[in-house]
Amino acid sequence: MVKILAIGKGTQDVFLKSDEFDPHKEGKHMYTHLPLGLKMEVEDVHFCTGGNATNVAVTFARQGLESAYLWGLGEDPASQSILQDLDNEGVNTTHVVQARDFQSGYSVIMIATNGERTILNHRGRAFGRTGRHNFNLDVIGDYDWIYPTSLGDGGLPLLREIVDMAEKHNVKVMLNPAGPELAEHDKLVALLDGVDVLCTNKEEMQMLVSGETCEELALHALNYVPVAIVSDGPNGVVATDGKTIVRAGMYEDVPVVDRTGAGDAFASGFLSQWAQGKSLRESIVFASANSTSVVTKIGAKAGILHKHSTLHEMPIHEKPLNQRSKE
């Protein structure tokens, strides 16, 4: 059985739905006033757990892989809720470091009427008073793959430690870098030689390599990693493993309830199949289906697919890298 370790923050998410949360006509702002002293009614409240690393760990577990989670959590109710959710999903939490002065992340998510959202986020505290973590990174050597994401105050220095430890033990790495890592271009690029699969959206990849289209970006990323995946929202995704290149459209046009966790579902969906030896095409199809399922439910985990879920065909094209086939 493939063994995958997810590393990164966990959060308690509180979702608020209200007809008052209307998107601006251009779709870029939530057109809602919150006057001081006013009580605004909300129609629905959902308590869920989230955080990129816990989300991907659940995908791995539901796909029958040996999934584990490593991070620092506190003894607060939110931390306990995260652990309980992961335990219920069959994710190994023995590597979690709990300390009284640690605290999980916490997010209040206001869902607009079109499924987009505004997130009020508290990052939590997963490091001791010295500012250094006390995680046992030696456990990385017990796994086939690791998936580090959202490393909070650890940032690039911690990511460097993690990737170096993976290289030491010949463990493969999938990386979906967050904003703080992307902001330090040179340092991030310098550690990509230890990454096996790099997954970003179009705008994020443009922060790392040159290119205008997703295909150009994916091909340029091959200079650093063996497998590159570039997504562009409803415009689809491009992926390449250096042998073939796959371009996929939307898996299915479904009513969007909440987009939280869609990116995590896509990336972890891909790795859950790729790590088991599935083809690039097969892995992208499942990734797309997993992401599509997640946006139909509130929260990042409720819609994650289980093993043996029935999939259908989708718009997808594959070609050898040495050919320019006509679509």
Image (cartoon, rainbow, N blue to C red):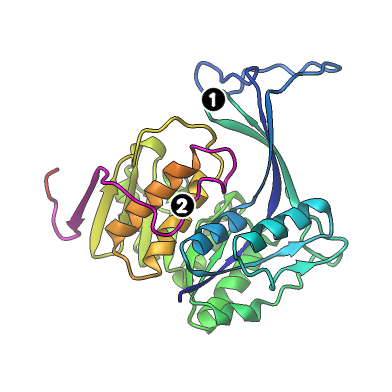
Q: Amino acid at mark 1?
A: Lys
Nearest to N terminus: mark 2 or mark 1: 1
Name the residue that disc number 2 marks. 305
Residue drawn where x is 80% and y is 66% of the image: 98
**Total numbered labels:** 2
Q: On the rendered structure, is 73 left or right of 286?
A: right
Q: On the rendered structure, is 212 left or right of 77?
A: left
Q: Amino acid at mark 2?
A: Leu
Q: What crowding class fits label 1: few (fewer than 14 Cα within 10 Å), some (14-19), or many (20 or more)?
A: few
Q: Position of residue 327 (x, y in %)?
A: 14, 43
Q: 219 or 17, which is in the foreground?
A: 17
What is the C-alpha distance between the residues marked 2 and 1? Answer: 30 Å
Point out which mark residue 146 bears. none
Q: Which residues are magenta?
A: 296-324
Residue drawn where x is 59% and y is 53% of the image: 52
Name the residue that disc number 1 marks. 28
Q: On the rendered structure, is 83 left or right of 284?
A: right
Q: Where 192 sits versus 85, above or below?
A: below
Q: Position of residue 90 (x, y in %)?
A: 60, 65
